[in-house]
Image: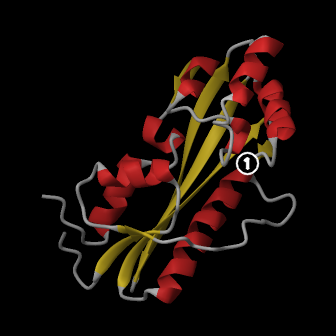
Amino acid sequence: MSAGVFEELLLASTSSGRRALMEGLGLPFRAVAPGVDEDVPPGTAPQHAVAMLAERKARAVFDRFPRALVIGSDQLVSLQGETLGKPENEAAARKQLGSLRGKTHEILTGVCVMGAGFVQTEVDTARLSVLPLSDEELDGYVATGEWQGCAGGYRVEARGQALFERIDGDRTAIQGLPMQRLTRLLREAGVKFF
């Protein structure tokens, strides 16, 4: 990787899904826990909230490693204007999934690339339609534990794929890191891929 004035590439995340997507690029990088407060002011529009959180995560890591190029990302699920975050327990996961069944919702994924003299933040929006699942199917999926750490209470890259009737959007964004947007931003920051 040639990144101009940047000494290393850092991913401000401990997400295994985001790390796997980054590994696919073949660039050397290191994952660093951002350790930030993920609260946003009440009433913040989902689009602004994910951008704010992605930038907050990137900034927290950049402040510790000012010679690095840092990638921050965050994700929220929006159902008819209501934001769904990461459920805290099985009951909350079941409630979230129950509210999504038979409906179409949006996943908003914010990505921020930050380095010395470079800051760009973008938001990707995907639309997902959940099947009209039975209570038995909801309980069965929640029992898999895949909901843990996932906005909306599901993991689309695993068994959660079977929850959906239709998915419109960038699959990598849905998995947590919009790779087409990210590679463009990295190029703009001076990263060479080949």
Of all residues, the one furthest to the left in this rendering is 194
Asked whether the viewer can see residue 177, the reply is no
Depth check, front residue: 175 or 14: 14
In this view, 33 is above or below 147: below
The image shows residue 72, relative to residue 68, as above or below, that is above
Total labels drawn: 1
**Which part of the image, by quadrant, shows the C terminus?**
bottom left
Q: Estimate the x, y position of residue 32 in percent, counting from the top left.
A: 48, 72
Residue 85 in picture, x, y percent from top left: 75, 48
Quarter of the view holding residue 28: bottom left
**For mark 1, what is the residue?**
86
105 and 160: which is toward the camera:
160
Q: Nearer the viewer, residue 181 or 39?
A: 39
Residue in the picture at 65% in, 34% down: 154
The three-letter amino acid code for the residue at tag 1 is Lys
Within-10-Å neighbours for mark 1: few <14, some 14–19, many 20+? some
